[in-house]
């Protein structure tokens, strides 16, 4: 995992906040100064909070759990989708399906329906139905894929939520808080960081700023996944070693018993 550098964050514009009149007073600890009516974020605190969040995400990934990324705003959705795919984590970049977390079983039903449509479309009898019916099925499948495609493999609730712009994604944040799911997020000067477990003070409107922070998070997750794979390999090696030792012990015991029988004196028959 590469180290976040002050100059890199500065170049990406992570320090740019909102106009002073739009600020949330709870962001005061993360604001460096005001310049021309605009709040400037303290990047030293950004680095500290980003490292804290990255360490937590690494442990979640190492334990084999999923982190759901949420970013539906235009300047964030493409960046998030491209980066998060590399670590095989679920993401929502279209409309947030209301009740996705609090009513997770309904979402799972929609995913099952999407899988059923897939089977129908690959069935040899699919071409035998009318063209109009085929179009209806294909449109419904495309709509489901747009809304649920990236979370189709999410078979249970995620272990954490990573959000870009908590004001826009307030429903997702509220659902996660209700279910006590840990939340990670970029918090700009117009947000309430108290709503987030792992807030990262940074500009959440510029794609370069989002990419700079997200890159650090994704690298941490990848590192956690790599360590998980290494742990599995080590466990397999230990199990094989134990099995070999058990087999060797059993063979040795067998040989000792055989040798004991050979050394045992034979009884003489009484005449």
Image (tube, rainbow, N blue to C red):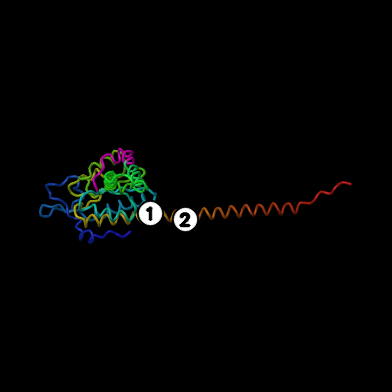
Identify which residue, 51 or 12, lies in the foreground: 12
Q: How many marks?
A: 2
| Main SS, magenta residues | loop
Corner quadrant of residue 231: bottom left
In the figure, residue 102 lies in which quadrant? top left
The label shown at residue 121 is none
Residue, far right: 271
- Residue 40 in the figure: left or right of residue 163: left
What is the crowding at mark 2: few (fewer than 14 residues within 10 Å), some, or many (at least 20)?
A: few
Farthest residue to the left: give it.
36
C-alpha gap between disc 1 and disc 2 = 14 Å
Residue 234: mark in rendering: 2
Rendered residue at 60%/53% (across/down): 247
Instruction: Tell me the residue at 30%/38% (across/down).
Output: 103
Q: Is residue 112 magenta?
A: no
Pointer 1 residue: 225
Magenta region includes residue 107: yes
Tell which circle, 1 or 2, labels the residue nearer the N-terminal end: 1
SS for dot 1: helix
In the picture, the quarter occupied by the N terminus is: bottom left
The front one of 126 and 158 is 126
* Residue 238, horizontal then vertical, whole percent: 51, 54
Residue 197 appears in the figure? no
Residue 104: x and y in percent read: 32, 40
- The span picked out in magenta is 94-109
């Amino acid at each position: 995992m590469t180290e976040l550098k002050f100059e890199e964050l500065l170049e990406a514009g992570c320090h740019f906040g909102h106009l002073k009149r739009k600020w949330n007073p709870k962001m005061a600890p993360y604001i460096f100064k005001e310049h021309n009516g605009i709040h400037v974020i303290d990047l030293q605190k950004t680095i500290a909070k980003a490292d804290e969040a990255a360490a937590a995400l690494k442990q979640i990934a190492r334990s084999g759990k999923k982190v759901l990324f949420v970013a539906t705003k235009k300047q964030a959705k493409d960046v998030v989708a491209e980066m998060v795919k590399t670590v095989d984590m679920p993401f929502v970049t279209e409309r947030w399906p209301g009740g996705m977390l609090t009513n997770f079983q309904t979402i799972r039903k929609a995913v099952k329906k999407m899988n059923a449509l897939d089977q129908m479309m690959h069935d040899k009898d699919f071409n035998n139905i009318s063209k109009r019916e085929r179009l209806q099925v294909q449109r419904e499948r495309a709509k489901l894929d747009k809304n649920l495609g990236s979370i189709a493999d999410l078979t249970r609730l995620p272990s954490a939520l990573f959000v870009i712009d908590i004001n826009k994604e307030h429903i997702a944040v509220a659902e996660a808080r209700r279910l006590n799911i840990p939340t990670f997020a970029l918090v700009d000067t117009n947000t309430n960081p108290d709503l987030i477990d792992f807030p990262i003070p940074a500009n959440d409107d510029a794609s370069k700023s989002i990419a700079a922070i997200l890159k650090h998070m994704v690298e941490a997750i990848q590192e956690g996944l790599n360590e998980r794979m290494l742990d599995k390999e080590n466990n397999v090696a230990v199990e094989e070693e134990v099995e070999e030792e058990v087999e060797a012990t059993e063979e040795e015991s067998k040989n000792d018993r055989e040798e004991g029988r050979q050394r045992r004196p034979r009884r003489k028959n009484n005449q």
